[in-house]
Amino acid sequence: MMSSLASLAYAGRAWPFEQARALIARLIKARVEGHEAQKRALNLIEAGKLDEALGNFEGLGRPVIFETGYGPSGLPHIGTFGEVARTTMVRQAFDAMTGGVWPSRLICFSDDMDGLRKVPEGIPNSEILREDLYKPLTVVRDPFGEHPSFGQHNNHRLMKFLDGFGFAYEFLSSTDCYKGGVFDTTLLMALERFDDIQKIMLPTLGPDRRSTYSPFLPISPKTGHVLQVPTLERNVSKGTIVFEEPDSVTGKAERFEVPVTGGHVKMQWKPDWAMRWAALGVDYEMSGKDLIDSVKVSSQVCRVLGGVPPEGFNYELFLDEQGQKISKSKGNGLTMEDWLRYGAPESLAYYMFQSPKSAKKLYFDVIPRATDEYLQQLEAYPKQDLAKQIENPVWFVLRGQEAGEGMPVTFGLMLNLVSAANASDKDTLWGFLRAYIPGATPESEPLLDRLAGYALNYFEDFVKPSKAFRLPDAREAAAMRDLAERFRALPADTRDAETLQGLVFEVGKTHEFDPLRAWFQALYEVLLGQSQGPRFGSFVAIFGLERTIDLLEQGIEGKLVGE
């Protein structure tokens, strides 16, 4: 019978479970012949008899192939990571539904044989790239001087980051696949069915492009450039194409004949995508909303090449601070290194899980909120039953591993602690944290320790430059004096956040702030130099009564305005 986890996963509502169910339906349709046989296979799987289904239907026994694609024409950005993270979440849902019995693979494919069409912004030694324009990315020299090519440099950056997250994947290089013969059979089929591919592609192009378009991009034997030239002749029996390349000096066209195999040509990207699906047997690949039409065209070409287009869905795009699509070549938006300077890796994976069908801003100011939202989910996770746990983003972020305890301190609170304490290092912060959490150490609370480091970095780079303290007006000053006196009346070691928060509320009501949030806004603006902040009672609990009273007095006297 189906295990408890598999049964719950099969009924799961989170989007990865929806995708996994659609994938299972696609696998049955693609790999089992006949309506009655397909119905039988689905019934067995839904009944939890996966072993029987895989044993009775030979086609189902093959591993399920998930794929993500990456173009290393620029440094990898978070959008690239997001596709791997989200695909991994669907794979996790699939494995949960099938009890891990149905083997699966995740291929991270780099289109590194593509020609470099323009020089990305923000790259050192850009003159090297300019000299190597139009060559395959694995031939273009590395401007960083660290790897044999620019493509390999970017591939290494991506793999290093994915490895750091512990993703289980297989990396495939387009260059290696073309030159190593992985695509040979499908490339020869594409040559044979050249006209059928053209019938699909030409109607999608403008008149000028249509007149010269070929699905094959030959690599020039003279310049090494990836050429956009017409195919003049095809020799199916020899497996070759003929094309002309003008001489850069004389302008006279020189004719060449090259094999379509062995890395002598690369396919145009939509036929290339389709060829890859067919050659590798890809079952699932997601892509951005901007590629919806491309998926349709590539799916048609995939069928011409004898393949079955993969299951997948289209996620919304990531936007930069100005609402523009992030791009590797522009270098706008965040790099993965940026996020990890200011936020936990778990918060990044959480951000990728949330609402993939909605456009998402991907800039520095999303990090604190994503971090605190993740911490809220983490706190709830251990208290939930299994049915609710697998709907919690934490289950996908931690890939089903056991979660630790929740965090007693939010990222927002830590930022304000850094500000109020003028902290510049972790040791200062830990002085407050130990008083608030008896017995806590960086070793016993590693996530809290990391949070302290992220808060220090974020405060220094983004919060501190924009802080603007102000003087309180007469009513605000009176209320702050009242609050200070009430704090003095409490035992000096009071650390109960709810008691302190209640007292702050009481003072605001006594001094007739309407709405009450105007009182809290005044506290934040006068004491912390910003218009909003964490629960003030929680801040006082960790900062300490004596220090908070001193802060109130400095704010009332205007001593903070000059900071």
Image (cartoon, helix red, strand yellow):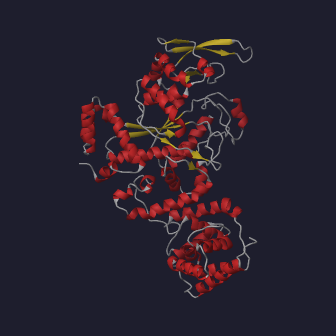
**Residue in the image at 47% along x and 49% along y:** 166
- Residue 11 is left or right of residue 472, and the answer is left
Residue drawn at the location 49% of the way across and 16% of the way down: 195
Residue at image x 74%, y 76%? 559
Q: Is residue 182 visible?
A: no
Q: In this image, 467 relative to 11: left or right?
A: right
Rendered position, 523 above or below 247: below
Residue 292, position as x, y percentages in the image:
51, 35
Give the vertical position of 500 relative to 269 (above or below): below
Q: Determine which quarter of the picture holds residue 467.
A: bottom right
Q: Residue 348: horizontal and vertical position, in percent?
A: 53, 53
Residue drawn at (52%, 28%), measured in percent from left and top?
270
Where is the C terminus found, in terms of image quarters?
A: bottom right
Q: Nearer the viewer, residue 385 or 181?
A: 385
306 versus 291 height, above or below: above
Q: Position of residue 229 (x, y in %)?
A: 61, 19
Judge whether residue 232 can be spotted in this image.
yes
136, above or below 415, in the image: above
Q: Position of residue 47 (x, y in %)?
A: 25, 45
